[in-house]
Image: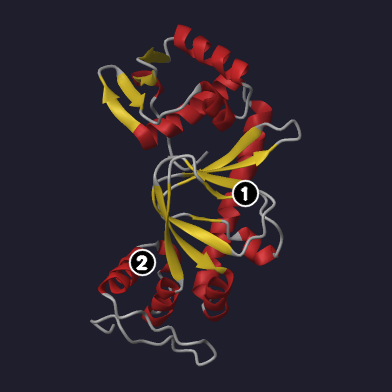
Amino acid sequence: MNQMGLQWRYTNRDDKALVPSHSRRARDVLMDSLAFLQSLSLFQGLSDDALRYLAAGSRQRTFRVGETVFYQGEPGSTCHIVARGRLRVYVMGEDGRELSVRLFGQGEIVGEMALFEDLPRSASVEALEQTRTLELDRDVLLGCLRRSPALALELLRSLSARLRHANEEAEGLASLTVPERLMRRLRQLASWYGAPSPDGVRVTLPMNQQELATLVGASRESVNRALMRLRRQGKVRIEGGWIVLLDGELAYSSPRAS
């Protein structure tokens, strides 16, 4: 790699050469994006030139808590790779209520489905916390996919895992009670946002009852009743407005499983 990071070209002659700016800021952003892409298993099969092409074709974006990344129904021409923070994917039901579909964390890609289908966004995405992403245009990502079978295969695996997750979520909504769904979501949040407490783990993500209900996929009233039931059962307690999961309820196999 050119140590100055100033002049390089993607090796395929059909692609337009991408020449970064000479400014120190542009070089720093490019190298930061390149290092992040190199750290992801999704891009392990790419050549250095292809990774530089992706890095130079990306934009670093920062989203505040609650800020929308994109809306359901919008045209989809970009995708986002989470560099830091968490994103929530949700859809609007026919009754106008939000239903959370999935949470995305560092290293995960969101919004790529619209790039392949050439259809509007199937869901909305917002930041659960201060979040930084790398935004990639359709032409940049698809250009690499056409020339990298390894990347195409990894992306297929990612999409397959997401479909399996969606099926599991649908089964959970159909078969689990609201208290069971609430407990599963709280375990996930504790694995991401947990702080030690004398008798368990405190979930430190600021949420009101409506936001928690949206994550669970139930009404605010149902989730409030479920929370009180879990409290009576000794599975959780409320501490200064925070939810604490007690020791016996902390087992959770995968922080990105639900």
Residue type beneath disc 1: Tyr
- Please identify the residue farthest to the bottom as the structure is shown: 13
Residue at 63% from the left image edge and 35% from the top image edge = 99
Q: Is residue 258 above or below residue 72?
A: above
Residues packed near mark 2 inside 10 Å, few (<14), some (14 to 19) or many (20 plus): many
Q: Secondary structure at mark 1?
A: loop
Q: Which residue is mark 1?
A: 71
Say which amino acid is labelled 2: Ser
From the viewer's perspective, is residue 32 above or below residue 99? Answer: below
Residue found at x 41% / y 22%: 249
Point 70% across, 57% down: residue: 120
Given residues 130 and 182, the one toward you in this image is 130
Q: Please say if the residues under marks 1 and 2 sit with CB atoms less than 8 Å apart.
A: no
Horizontal side of residue 116 vs 236, given as left or right: right
Q: Residue at x 54, y 57 (%)?
A: 158
Q: Position of residue 84 (x, y in %)?
A: 37, 51
Calculate the distance from the C-alpha at mark 1 to the C-alpha at mark 2. Answer: 25 Å
Residue 73 at x, y percent in the picture:
70, 51
x and y percentages locating residue 16 in the rendered image: 50, 87
Mark 1 burial class by Cα count in 10 Å: few <14, some 14-19, many 20+: some
Q: Residue 33 — which label? A: 2
Which circle, 1 or 2, is nearer the viewer?
Answer: 1
Outermost residue, top side: 232
Question: Which colour style is shown?
Answer: secondary structure
Image quadrant holding the N terminus, namely bottom left
Q: Does label 1 or label 2 sit earlier along the sequence? A: 2
